[in-house]
Image (tube, rainbow, N blue to C red):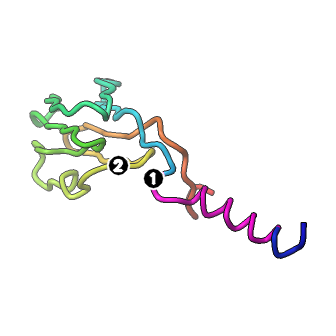
Amino acid sequence: MKRAGAVLLLCAGLAAGAAPGADPAPAVVEVRTAAGLVARLPLDRDRTLRVDGPLGQSVVEVRGGRARFARAACTGRLCLAAGWLGRDGDTAACVPNRVYLRLRGGPRRFDSMNF
């Protein structure tokens, strides 16, 4: 095989591996409180979960393979600003109410902070 053919084959292989949608989506969202794991919700089934914390109820919504805080009992509501979580390792927390979300089960991704 000539050098140009080898380079072309390598580029085609890299492009196929980097194609959008090639990575599987995360499988579950873990819902935790200060007491521990409350639920592991599959992301392929839409549902709503109410979670009690020290300030009241937080509402977690799962829809379309993603999860988010839909309602929060805290005053700052920064957890709502996190929006939809859709990739493995994505995390949102309602710190004053001590409720935490984390997506699990998809491919690991690396960035400059955890490389």
- Residue drawn at x 34%, y 35% as measured from the top left: 29
Q: Which residue is mark 1?
A: 21
Q: Which residue is mark 2?
A: 86
Looking at the picture, does residue 53 appear above or below residue 78? above
Q: Position of residue 58 (x, y in %)?
A: 14, 37
Mark 1–mark 2 CB contact (< 8 Å): no
* Relative side of 99 to 102, left or right: left
- Residue drawn at x 47%, y 35% as measured from the top left: 105
- Residue drawn at x 36%, y 47% as measured from the top left: 91
Looking at the picture, does residue 40 appear above or below residue 101? above
Would you call the spot at circle 1 few (<14 residues within 10 Å), some (14-19), or many (20 or more)?
few
Q: Give the SS element for disc 1.
A: loop
Q: Position of residue 33 (x, y in %)?
A: 28, 30
- Which quadrant would the C terminus be assigned to in this image? bottom right
Q: Position of residue 26 (x, y in %)?
A: 42, 40
Measured in 3D between alpha carbons, the distance from the residue under mark 1 to the one under mark 2, in whole angstroms, is 12 Å
Magenta segment boundaries in residue numbering: 6-21
Looking at the picture, does residue 104 appear above or below residue 17? above
**Viewer-proximal residue, 100 or 44?**
44
